[in-house]
């Protein structure tokens, strides 16, 4: 039987994380699986509260402290490197967000899919809200054209560039996709051994996109598995839905994704395409009175950030974490 390491990353959501973990433990029944919680240096007492709850409920869970908040990828890397309790590597690593709650058969469905589809390196779940509304979690890789389409928000442009749009219509059946959101995703350990873990240059956002792209370039598909269902609240730790201004780490991650995977020239063209689309959208807003769809000063912040980044000297070298390679400790 394939062995699974379940990793739950906590950042200042101890009660939510424990609720998610209890759902995961139910879904792990009958599987050869272990669960590890990584507290990402919350600094709010989360670690002690979770440790007390684990002891009081006698939960079969390991609790680790990351020691620093290096972001989503870095925190999950701590859990992945922890491996199984006997020190051996699992067959699969399953990442579950602290605000995600798998159905009783959700983890098994992902395992069964990877067991029977060797071409798939990663497999992710159908995600829905607690109200049952489906979430967009299946995507195409970002490109210059997707930057134009996403920023313009204009029907004729979107229809012309439909094949380049990042977000996909929610699949109604299991199928390959470019990349999946990391709320509920299972990964082959052998693929991670080949391509490396999360690139820790990404503090938050674009790290799953980068990882799936590296897997694709190494010949491994990413599959959306409709039979695996997970409820997800979303943005509990990040506060994304409440952003008044786009955070610097989002801008840094976007720029790093494009420059790392396509080069600085491509990144500049992507930013210019976003600027053109953004101007079109804002012109339409003036004419039609449409409500704002971005955080305040978003386009100005993005273009100013990317201009500064484009003028910085090129880095002379990268660390293994920046390349997305595993680091032996």
Image: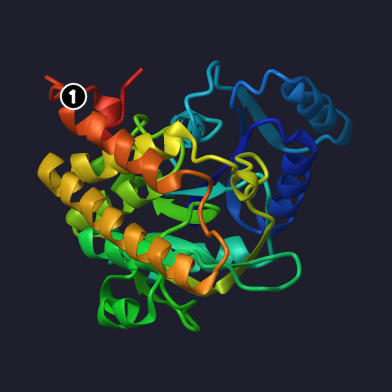
Residue occupying image coordinates x 62% and y 50%: 241
Name the colouring of the figure: rainbow
Which quarter of the figure has residue 85?
A: top right
Which residue is farthest front?
287
Question: With respect to residue 249, does 69 lie above or below?
Answer: above
Q: Is residue 11 left or right of residue 213?
A: right
Q: Give 89 or 271, whichever is nearer the viewer.
A: 271
Which quarter of the figure has residue 306?
A: top left
Residue 200 pos. (x, y %) = 37, 30
Which residue is farthest right?
56
Residue 263 pos. (x, y %) = 13, 42
Asked whether the viewer can see residue 249, the reply is yes
Q: How many marks?
A: 1
Residue occupying image coordinates x 20% and y 40%: 259
Classify 10 Å Cα crowding around label 1: few (below 14), some (14-19), many (20 and above): few
Q: Give 231 or 167, whichever is nearer the viewer.
A: 167
Asked whether the viewer can see residue 115, the reply is no
Question: With respect to residue 142, does 192 lie above or below?
Answer: above
Image quadrant where one finds the C terminus: top left
Residue occupying image coordinates x 72% and y 48%: 20
Per the image, the residue denoted by label 1 is 312
Residue 182 pos. (x, y %) = 49, 52
Question: With respect to residue 169, does 268 lie above or below?
Answer: above
Q: Is residue 313 left or right of residue 46?
A: left
Residue occupying image coordinates x 45% and y 78%: 169
Question: With respect to residue 278, does 62 lie above or below?
Answer: above
Residue 285 pos. (x, y %) = 47, 66
Q: Is residue 231 left or right of residue 302?
A: right
Q: Report helix, strand or loop for mark 1.
A: loop
């Amino acid at each position: 039987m394939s062995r699974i390491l379940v990793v739950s990353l906590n950042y200042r959501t101890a009660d939510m994380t424990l609720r998610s973990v209890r759902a995961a433990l139910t879904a792990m029944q009958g599987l050869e699986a272990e669960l590890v919680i990584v507290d990402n240096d919350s600094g709010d007492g989360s670690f002690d509260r979770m440790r007390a709850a684990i002891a009081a409920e006698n939960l079969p869970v390991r609790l680790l402290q990351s020691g620093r908040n290096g972001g989503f990828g870095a925190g999950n890397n701590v859990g992945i490197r922890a491996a199984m309790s006997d020190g051996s590597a699992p067959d699969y690593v399953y990442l579950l967000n602290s605000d995600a709650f798998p159905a009783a058969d959700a983890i098994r469905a992902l395992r069964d899919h990877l067991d029977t589809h060797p071409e798939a390196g990663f497999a992710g779940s159908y995600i829905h809200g607690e109200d049952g509304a489906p979430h967009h979690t299946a995507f195409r890789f970002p490109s210059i054209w997707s930057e134009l389409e996403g920023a313009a928000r204009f029907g004729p442009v979107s229809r012309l560039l439909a094949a380049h749009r990042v977000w996909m219509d929610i699949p109604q059946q299991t199928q390959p996709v470019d990349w999946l959101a990391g709320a509920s995703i299972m990964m082959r350990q052998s693929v991670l051994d080949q391509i490396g873990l999360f690139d820790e240059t990404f503090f938050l956002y674009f790290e799953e996109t980068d990882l799936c792209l590296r897997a694709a370039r190494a010949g491994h598909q990413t599959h959306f598995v409709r039979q695996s269902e997970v409820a997800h609240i979303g943005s509990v730790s990040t506060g994304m839905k409440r952003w008044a201004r786009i955070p610097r780490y989002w801008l840094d991650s976007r720029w790093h994704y494009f420059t790392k995977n396509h080069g600085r020239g491509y990144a500049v063209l992507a930013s210019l395409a976003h600027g053109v689309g953004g101007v079109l959208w804002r012109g339409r807003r003036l004419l039609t009175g449409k409500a704002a769809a971005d955080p305040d000063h978003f386009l100005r912040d993005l273009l100013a950030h990317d201009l500064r980044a484009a003028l910085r000297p090129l880095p002379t070298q990268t660390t293994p974490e920046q390349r997305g390679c595993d680091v032996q400790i």
